[in-house]
Image: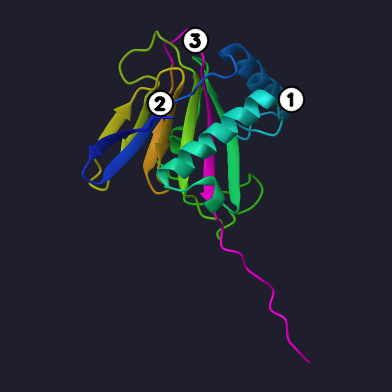
Amino acid sequence: MDIQEIKLSDSLTIYKSKYDWKYSQEELIDKTKQNHILIGNNDYTTSAFHIQSNAINHVKKYGRQLVTKLMNLTDEKIDTWVEQHWIYYSNNTTTQPKTALTFHSHPITLTTTTSTPIPNIKTNWTYCFYLKVPTDLSGDEGKLMFRDSNNNEFGILPETGDIILFGPNDLHVPNFIPNSKGERIAICANVSINLHTYKKQTTLL
């Protein structure tokens, strides 16, 4: 489980790893599309990940292990964790309002489409596992774009099997693939490790 450091600028560093393909790409795509079809989209490109399988759970565990490795935590030092997973799907028919195509970050782990984020569960790391990336892309198509604190922009073109990890405040936006004949499918997650536990105070009478 190797993790590569990628220093994009003095103020922005991201990380990259590879999935071990314990389960095949075909099975993972099948389970991902099953969720995408039965659950539906949250917005133009994302779908919540509710349907479980051994293959999907392995991806989730693998991603969490990468996060804990970045945090220098061993299993015995991990007490609790929170994860929010989603599917990002696009092809050459995917469209989205320009107002929605903005750089953003994931400081809060849990968000919903019907209420405000849960502010006391903060993200340690976000990762995206690229289950399928077309090979007929041109220019900046399909790149994951980042913006540093000096407003410099950097594009990373992931390959199938890549896992890109970045911090909760790192600004990013994925580019569409309008000229591709393929699909771009990613399984992404916000991860929070070892939440502070709030104990209910009791009063002795």
Which residue in the structure is indicated by mark 3?
182
Q: Quadrant of the C terminus?
A: bottom right
Rendered position, 32 above or below 134? below
Displayed quadrant of residue 41: top right
Q: Which residues are drawn in magenta?
A: 178-205
* Label 3 crowd (10 A; few <14 / some 14-19 / many >=20): some
Q: Position of residue 62 (x, y in %)?
A: 54, 32
Q: How is the image coloured?
A: rainbow
Residue type marked 1: Leu
Query: Which residue lies under the disc numbered 2?
Result: 175
Q: Is residue 15 magenta?
A: no
Q: Which of 81 and 120 is in front in this view?
A: 81
- Which label's residue is closer to the chain start, 3 or 2? 2
The numbered dot on residue 38 is: 1
Which residue is at a point 39% across and 49% down the rendered structure image? 169
Q: Where is residue 97 in the image (x, y as percent from the top left)?
A: 49, 32
| Front in this rendered view, residue 198 or 37 | 198
Q: In which quarter of the image is residue 1?
A: top left
Amino acid type at image mark 3? Gly
Total label count?
Answer: 3
Query: Magenta region, mostly helix, strand or loop?
Result: loop
Q: Position of residue 67 (x, y in %)?
A: 47, 41
Q: Is residue 124 left or right of residue 148?
A: right
Say whether residue 133 is left or right of residue 115.
Answer: left
